[in-house]
């Protein structure tokens, strides 16, 4: 986010530059490489306006909110668990080990979980285009989004596929706009 905000987005995938920026801003040793499509760096621009500590805790709070919203989106799909004990589905979401790790490390994985839950909720409500549009935002992690989109293609769920392609085109355009064509292609 800082590199985008400071006009250095064209070097977003330059590991040496990433390390310089991280050494300047973070109390860490070594580089934590940015391995996401460039459009996802735009999500972190607001956090770059905060100190490292404030950004960490703000993102942590956002992740908690997204985890709670994911639970809210999915709770009606978990009726048997609620019958055993009403708070059980929420407790399972909060105690799920990968969710705890993602919270501690402030990963974007909880955002990804929320996007998949939101896409599922749209599909449950018979809104396939909206589900596909949300699913396209999951391109933050292409390695998970593309196989899911492929399944909808194989199932001939054309509205979901159309929504996915529209959002994917928009996110790729945002990536090119953020980094420039040469850095995007590299």
Image (cartoon, rainbow, N blue to C red):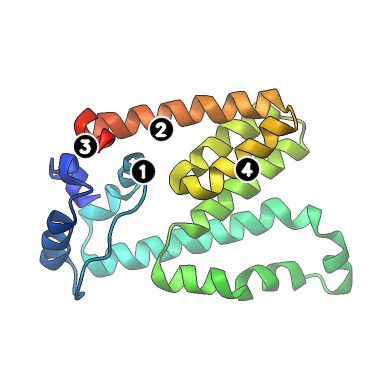
Residue marked by disc 2: 171
The numbered mark, 3 or 2, whose residue comes first in the sequence reads 2
- Front-most of 182 and 1? 182
Report, in whole angstroms, how far the alpha carbon at label 2 lies from the one at label 1.
9 Å
- Front-most of 105 and 157? 157
The crowding category of the residue bearing disc 4, from other C-alpha atoms within 10 Å (few below 14, some 14 to 19, many at least 20), is some
Give the mark toward the camera: 3 or 2: 3
Question: Which residue shows up at 47% across the image and 68% down it?
Answer: 102
Q: Quadrant of the C terminus?
A: top left
Relative side of 5 to 165, left or right: left
> Residue 148: which numbered mark, if any?
4
The numbered mark, 4 or 3, whose residue comes first in the sequence reads 4
Q: Secondary structure at mark 1?
A: loop
Give the mark toward the camera: 1 or 3: 3
Tell me where residue 16 appears, x and y as whole percent.
13, 58
The crowding category of the residue bearing disc 1, from other C-alpha atoms within 10 Å (few below 14, some 14 to 19, many at least 20), is many
Vertical placement of 30 versus 58: above or below? below
Q: Is there CB contact under 8 Å for labels 2 and 1?
A: yes
Residue marked by disc 3: 183
Residue marked by disc 1: 37
Give the mark toward the camera: 2 or 1: 1
Q: Is there CB contact under 8 Å for labels 1 and 3?
A: no
């Amino acid at each position: 986010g800082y590199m985008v905000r400071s006009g250095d987005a064209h070097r977003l995938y330059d590991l040496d530059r990433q390390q310089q920026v991280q050494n300047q801003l973070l109390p860490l040793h070594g580089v934590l490489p940015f391995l996401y499509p460039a459009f996802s760096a735009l999500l972190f621009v607001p956090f770059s306006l905060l100190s490292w500590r404030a950004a960490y805790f703000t993102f942590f709070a956002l992740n908690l909110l997204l985890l709670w919203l994911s639970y809210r989106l999915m709770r009606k799909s978990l009726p048997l668990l609620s019958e055993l004990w009403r708070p059980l589905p929420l407790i399972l979401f909060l105690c799920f080990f990968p969710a705890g790790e993602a919270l501690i490390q402030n990963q974007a994985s909880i955002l990804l979980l929320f996007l998949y839950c939101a896409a599922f909720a749209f599909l449950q409500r018979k809104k396939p285009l909206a589900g596909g549009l949300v699913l396209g935002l999951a391109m933050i992690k292409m390695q998970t989004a593309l196989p899911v989109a492929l399944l909808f293609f194989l199932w001939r769920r054309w509205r979901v596929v159309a929504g996915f392609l529209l959002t994917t085109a928009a996110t790729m355009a945002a990536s090119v706009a953020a980094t420039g064509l040469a850095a995007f292609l590299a």
